[in-house]
Amino acid sequence: MSEWRTIGLSVVLLCALASAGCARVTTSERAPPPPRAPADMEEAARVNTELGVAYAREGQFDVAQEKLERALQQNGNYAPAHSALAIVYQQRRDPIKAEEHFQRALKLNPRDPHTRNNFGVFLCGQKRVDDAEALFLQAAADPDYREPEAAFTNAGVCARRIPDLDRAERHFREALALKPDFAEALAQMASLYYERKDYLRARAFLQRYERVGPPTAATLWIGAKVEFALGDELAASDYAQRLKSAFPESEEHLNIAPRPAS
């Protein structure tokens, strides 16, 4: 189960292969290239941003940073490049530069819901919960945002870190009101009700999750704990065995000793 939904890096990698023949010239004969038109620079910035995003998605942050910085050299006001570079710096644990580029991206495109959502994830990681929540809710309210349920779920995850379970539940329910089978929100609700020791509701939300989402270490762990708390040791053992088989190195498996939340 992914804790965060960061939307906005789903641009398509543009692969362009070009070949051209040209006459050989000596250094003294080579004329300087003509200045590039602004439109050419904007297109180059777009292509380098897409390449940078693609490398970032593969975890190749050095190359991603190089491409995104080149994009900003070509067009320093290209908001998607700032937004993507902010996420790269976030992954590289450089919060000062990450926030700088998030702020710049929003200044250039204040209504971009993807940047708002991703900036909210960053701010919550910095324990700036109120600021993060405001951005999540702004993203969710944007009619052009295709996944408002993800922003509401992120707001709930952030509220749980306070912890404020009532606030978190409200946001998860807002997500489920928009999309009742949204897996991330269902898993979060199962975990939240387990934390509250409301094991029947935790089981119900987990069963709903299992109809739409794949088993994860977190959901199998919750299942084992919930079933043990409800006295169904056979079901608890089944969850624990599935956790061991699928995620033997997970923290959840290493801490599976069944017992209800204290």
Image (cartoon, rainbow, N blue to C red):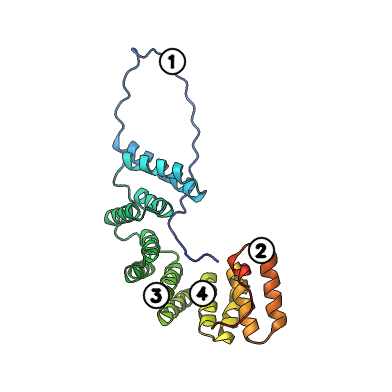
Q: Nearer the viewer, mark 4 or mark 1?
A: 4
Residue 162 is labelled as: 3
Sequence order check, earlier mark of 3 and 2:
3
Using the numbered discs, state the Cα–Cα distance from disc 4 to disc 3 in whole angstroms.
Answer: 15 Å
**Measured Cα–Cα span from mark 2 to mark 1:** 61 Å
For marks 4 and 2, give the one nearer the viewer. Answer: 2
3D distance between C-alphas at marks 1 and 3: 66 Å
SS assignment at label 3: loop
Give how far across and how far down residue 87 sits, in percent: 40, 54
Give the class, few, some or many, for how many residues have Cα within 10 Å of label 1's Cα (few <14, many ≥20): few
On the rendered structure, is 101 left or right of 170?
left
Q: Mark 1 points at which residue?
A: 23
- Marks 3,2: beta carbons within 8 A: no
Q: Which of marks 4 and 1 is nearer the N terminus?
A: 1
Q: Hey, what amino acid is under mark 4?
A: Gln
Residue where numbered disc 2 is placed: 248
